[in-house]
């Protein structure tokens, strides 16, 4: 029973400290900056270009109407499918856009992002991807409020569209759980995870960090490893769970494509500090202790401890979903997490036995 009690205590502490159940939105905060650049990196995205420009235009307009100087940079990272032509055609009537073609000497998105920073001039930079769309025209207004005055890095959320397939449900669950981890870490004062699909930062902190220095060789980490480096240099990190500050994104349509995506992401986690690995492993340790408690002493008390831990984690997950503008009733999907864990284990193993894939 001791195993079960300790396991339940771990989950109770984690739920209170790191589950992001009490996330709040920053509203109407004064920003020290007045110019913003949106940077989008593309590789072989010709079919998405028109939708990307159309989706971002209302957000650019809204921020401009709020008094900001607005620009946007599209980095064509060595595409071979006509992405450059599509970008030129879609942006030629909007002088705020700057299309830059760069050679692809590395398969990492970091190379393209560095080029985007060099081509942009905003005091604040907001990054997103070609397969992302703002959930609301006020997206940039929300993502830039408080820039420079209250934060140096602003973490936003990007969740997949709703799907009824098993693949879609698992992707949505994993995206929401990762978002919950990111939000909870920021709220607890231990930020370590950001999203290149929706994140803002000041040019000052970018310069202080030195771009992607130190992890250029890794296929991923343009968001989380960079954020961790920024924190080491004193960055103030904020998070915005407001639905209007989010983007929605397309996710891989097959199990194999999703596995390749996750295998690439794992290349960054191996560069995490040992202390961070230990902290992130606490929930798994808690579940192991709970299961060990039942195996060692299969009593009603041991089972009750497991049920209590699951209920607490589900409740805090539901509270997080509600604050993020998601249906809180879908917190029940937490019962599918063992399937997500099995998939992540498979993706990790494939990533260790095969070369990590490029970002696109």
Image: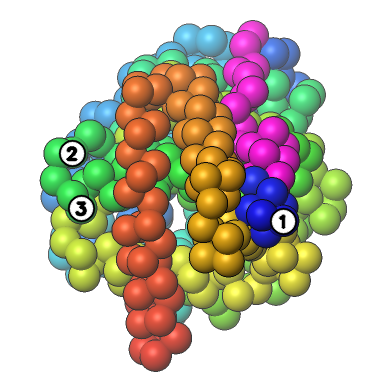
Residue that badge 3 annotates: 167
Q: Which residue is mark 1?
A: 2
The reply to whether the C-beta atoms of the residues labelled 2 and 3 are less than 8 Å apart is: yes
- Label 1 close to label 3 by CB (< 8 Å): no
The answer to if 14 sits in the magenta stretch is: yes
Front residue of 304/7: it is: 304
Image check: 24 left or right of 196?
right
Q: CA distance from mark 1 to mark 2?
A: 41 Å
Q: Is residue 273 visible?
A: yes
For residue 358, say whether it is visible. no
Q: Which residue is identified by label 2?
A: 163
Q: Which mark is residue 221?
A: none
Q: What residue range appears in magenta?
A: 9-28
Q: Residues within 10 Å of mark 1 (few under 14, many from 20)?
A: few
Residue at x 24%, y 29% (from the top left corner): 54
Placement of 186 over or under 297, stated as above or below:
above
Question: Magenta segment: does it hold 352?
Answer: no
What residue sits 40% from the left and 81% below the top? 349
How far is mark 1 from mark 3, CA to CA?
A: 37 Å
Look at the numbered disc 2 and give the secondary structure of its residue. loop
Above-or-below relation of 324 to 74? above
């Amino acid at each position: 029973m001791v195993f079960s009690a300790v396991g339940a205590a771990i989950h109770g502490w984690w739920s209170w400290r790191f589950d992001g159940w009490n996330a709040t939105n920053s509203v109407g905060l004064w920003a020290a900056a007045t110019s913003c650049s949106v940077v989008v990196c593309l590789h072989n995205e010709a079919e998405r270009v028109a939708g990307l420009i159309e989706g971002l235009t209302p957000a650019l307009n809204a921020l401009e109407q709020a008094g900001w100087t607005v620009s946007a940079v599209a980095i064509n990272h060595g595409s071979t499918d006509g992405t450059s032509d599509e970008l030129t055609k879609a942006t030629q009537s909007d002088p705020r856009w700057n299309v830059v073609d760069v050679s692809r000497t590395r398969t990492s998105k970091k190379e393209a992002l560095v080029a985007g920073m060099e081509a942009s001039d905003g005091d604040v930079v907001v990054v997103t991807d070609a397969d992302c769309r703002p959930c609301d025209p006020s997206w940039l207004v929300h993502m830039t409020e408080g820039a420079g005055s209250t934060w140096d890095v602003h973490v936003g959320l990007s969740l997949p569209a709703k799907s009824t397939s098993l693949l879609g449900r698992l992707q949505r669950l994993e995206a929401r759980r990762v978002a919950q981890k990111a939000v909870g870490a920021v709220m607890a004062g231990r930020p370590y995870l950001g999203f290149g699909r929706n994140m803002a930062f000041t040019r000052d902190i970018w310069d202080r960090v030195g771009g992607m220095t130190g992890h250029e060789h890794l296929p991923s980490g343009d968001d989380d490893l960079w954020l961790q480096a920024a924190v080491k240099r004193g960055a103030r990190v904020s998070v915005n769970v407001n639905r209007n500050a989010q983007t929605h994104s397309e996710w891989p349509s097959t199990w194999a494509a999703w596995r390749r995506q996750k295998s690439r992401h794992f290349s960054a986690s191996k560069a995490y500090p040992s202390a961070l690995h230990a902290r992130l492993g606490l929930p798994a340790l808690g579940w192991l202790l709970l299961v060990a408690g039942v195996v060692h002493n299969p009593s009603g008390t041991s089972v009750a401890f497991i049920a209590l831990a699951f209920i607490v984690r589900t409740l805090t997950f539901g509270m997080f979903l509600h604050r993020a503008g998601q249906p809180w009733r879908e917190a029940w999907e937490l019962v599918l997490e063992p399937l997500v864990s099995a998939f992540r284990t498979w993706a990790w193993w494939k990533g260790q036995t095969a070369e990590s894939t490029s970002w696109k």
